[in-house]
Image (cartoon, coloured by chain):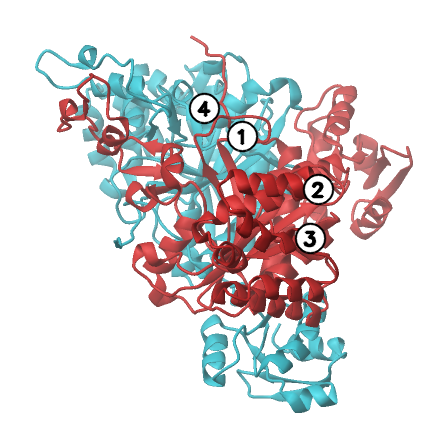
Chain colours: A red, B cyan
Amino acid sequence: MSQKPGIPKGTRDFNPEQMARRNYIFETIKGVFRSFGYAQIETPAMENLSTLLGKYGEEGDKLLFRVLNSGDPFSGVDFGSFRTEDGSWRSAALSSALCEKGLRYDLTVPFARFVVQHQGELSFPFKRFQIQPVWRADRPQKGRYREFYQCDVDAIGSRSQMLELELVQMVEEVFRKLDIRVVLKVNNRKVLTGLAEACGFPERVVDITVAIDKLDKIGLDAVKEEMLSKGLTPEAVAVLEPVLLLQGSFEEKISAMRRVLSGSETGLRGLDELEELFGFIASAGVTLPVEMDLSLARGLNYYTGAIFEVKALDWQIGSISGGGRYDNLTGIFGLKDMSGVGISFGADRIYDVLEGLGKFPSGLSSSATLLFANMDAESAAYVLPIASALRAKGVCTEVYPESGKLKKQFDYAARKGIPFISICGSSEAAEGKVNIKNLASGEQKSFDAGDTDGILDFFSYIA
Amino acid sequence: MSQKPGIPKGTRDFNPEQMARRNYIFETIKGVFRSFGYAQIETPAMENLSTLLGKYGEEGDKLLFRVLNSGDPFSGVDFGSFRTEDGSWRSAALSSALCEKGLRYDLTVPFARFVVQHQGELSFPFKRFQIQPVWRADRPQKGRYREFYQCDVDAIGSRSQMLELELVQMVEEVFRKLDIRVVLKVNNRKVLTGLAEACGFPERVVDITVAIDKLDKIGLDAVKEEMLSKGLTPEAVAVLEPVLLLQGSFEEKISAMRRVLSGSETGLRGLDELEELFGFIASAGVTLPVEMDLSLARGLNYYTGAIFEVKALDWQIGSISGGGRYDNLTGIFGLKDMSGVGISFGADRIYDVLEGLGKFPSGLSSSATLLFANMDAESAAYVLPIASALRAKGVCTEVYPESGKLKKQFDYAARKGIPFISICGSSEAAEGKVNIKNLASGEQKSFDAGDTDGILDFFSYIA
């Protein structure tokens, strides 16, 4: 009985070539994180549902993958009590009765749980990064998966915006190393709160921000109309109008905003923070383009200070990284006053940008440099110690496992992208020689079997 | 409302120190795999239950973590049809009605599924490695977890024992690099089949192997008695007795075994394979201790040729790696005649051995080399570009985010194991100097701010 094999929708296999490219992205990012003193942690794929539920809104709760209790999950469950009067199931409640664990939905809530659980062992500010898959029962579509890696870096336990600066510097370094031109957009949640307060509708932060965000697309008049249609008064819109007309240098914009927000303590604090951060950025000699963008509203319910988003300049795609400052992430787990700031790098989108722009370095695949063809048992025995000696010098080396048609062995090298092949038969063995051929150029050279340095030189032509 | 945070039993968080140690093991192993031309793949955490069920025996099926269907998992399920007459649940069947996906139990079945699904894109022999977590609903106990990493390397698509040799060489290299003394035990499934055939009880392979395995512990007579108690005849035991008395060199043992197995074609083929493999091992100049061990029976239902197990010589623990040859792994998914051979490195046990023997290299943690103390905003602005210049030279560098008590900043460096601290105030800024102190020796030196090479030299004392 054979099955046609497949994998669950929204999930992916990664073949060697894709892995090499993904590893290139992850290693680049990790190297930058480490150079700033951030250290890696990992948390379990499964968390208790009590840890996860209620942290991502009602919609998020529905997108959690739940893991059926092991042992006998059904005995002792009073199914009748989960029926509604019309006979349908109280699905969420019954799920919770059958499942006490779920797959992690992001790396942020597990990080908060980790910090609270291990607070006694950590040095604060605690600077960590975490690169692991997360799972969401979203409807799969192009670019949206049910399993995908997140790549998060956070510092927790200090309110200093020197940490925001570090994130900015890490964004600069990562994309410089990956050779992707980007712009970093920066906003501050307190400024958004201030705008809503200044115009007398403190509870309409989202509507106001969404409307401002449309300025480029629909123009000034349409934005004003949208604000009115959302119930703002003409007076409120008049207060906000200078924000829509903002022009000039960073300093000029900040001055104009100070006038708009003069009545909002929170708003003015947000402007102070933006000024401080842009000052840090200038001091540190950051050359990345950084723009203040007052329409940026990512994770509005969550962030309390700086908000970040990274856009690729040469490839049309949504944001490829984003994050911000949160003041109360660990509060839900009982640890108050732990301010933190973090950013998440979108590995799948970065992959698409690098692929789209043809910016993956060549030679990323982990193929061997040299294949020893296998002529017969005696010749194979002759080349085995030579292969070991080359590996000891760092040369990735294969010995073809089966003697037989050379054509097949050449094809193997070609398909795997192995650039050199060595064919040693009885005459080479008798003379203690190794023949090596550069498959691209056709150049062929003979070496003494012990001359690993000579062989390395030959390889370095293409390394 | 605050919750006391915790994680599901049998799962673990890994803190920065543990991660550094785990990464050391994984990076060492990966480097060896790559040097032999093995390439990395990854598969999804969730597989269709149809892929997983029936592959690990009845016991294994019970240990699968099942993932509740998303959307509304309960509507349309006729619960009544899953009740037995006594009112209890047909638990496995109901689970399958509610869950179509499960968490992967090992990396072998997903690998077989991968090979069949992607056969058209792969070059054979296909040499892959895979390092990912697996999940088992086992009862957690010391050293046994519900989530743990497996670290598998396999070559599929060739019957040549040159591939077995590569596994032996990789075992040698991995443990040489990790500085763990090990012995590799080798057996062959066909020899075990042959023994059972030779004594006239072909269906008693397991009983016979288990009895032979006890020789060292309970002695010759007790083993013979156990065989009799399992229903073997005195004649059968007499046939097997020479195996229990095996002595001498590898060649002498093989000769003795040839006499015992003279009536079993399969058994003789197993001996041929062992001889061939030991011949390859000698040709390749392997210095790892490799022992033939006829009692080795790991994965008996699964392996068809060579069987491997690695034991640490200086630390009491079970086997730390193991594997073998399988001739029909992909048959269940419809792809016949795909012989393969693989080995799995037990990362958790290797971790325990390295920790027990104190063999983790020092300085594994990814702490920064240098911490710039933060005296005040002006001084921080002064050191920021210097920190960037050092990072560009590969020095992992932190800038303490908050100005304030130096004691706190020194404590931070000490707790994180940062070996150098730099304290630059207004006078250093005025003179364009950088003071750096080696916290272990107390040595202190002053450099020109631009003299990154001089600073690197100072660090190299301890690098």
Tag 1 near tag 2, CB within 8 Å: no
**Circle 3 residue:** A245
State whether discs 2 and 4 lie on one chain.
no
- Label 1 – label 3 distance at C-alpha: 85 Å
- Label 1 – label 2 distance at C-alpha: 22 Å
Instruction: Kindly report which numbered mark, 1 or 2, lies closer to the viewer in this rendering.
Output: 2
**Circle 1 residue:** B275
Say what secondary structure mark 1 lies in.
helix
Disc 2 crowd, CA 10 A, few/some/many (<14, 14-19, 20+): many
Q: Can residue B283 be seen in this view?
A: no
* Chain of the residue displaying label 2: A
Say left or right for A77 vs B298: left
- Label 4 – label 3 distance at C-alpha: 94 Å
Q: Residue furthest front?
A: A234
**Circle 4 residue:** B258
Instruction: Kindly report which numbered mark, 1 or 3, lies closer to the viewer in this rendering.
Output: 3
* Residue sitting nearer the eye, B34 or B117: B117
* Chain of the residue displaying label 4: B
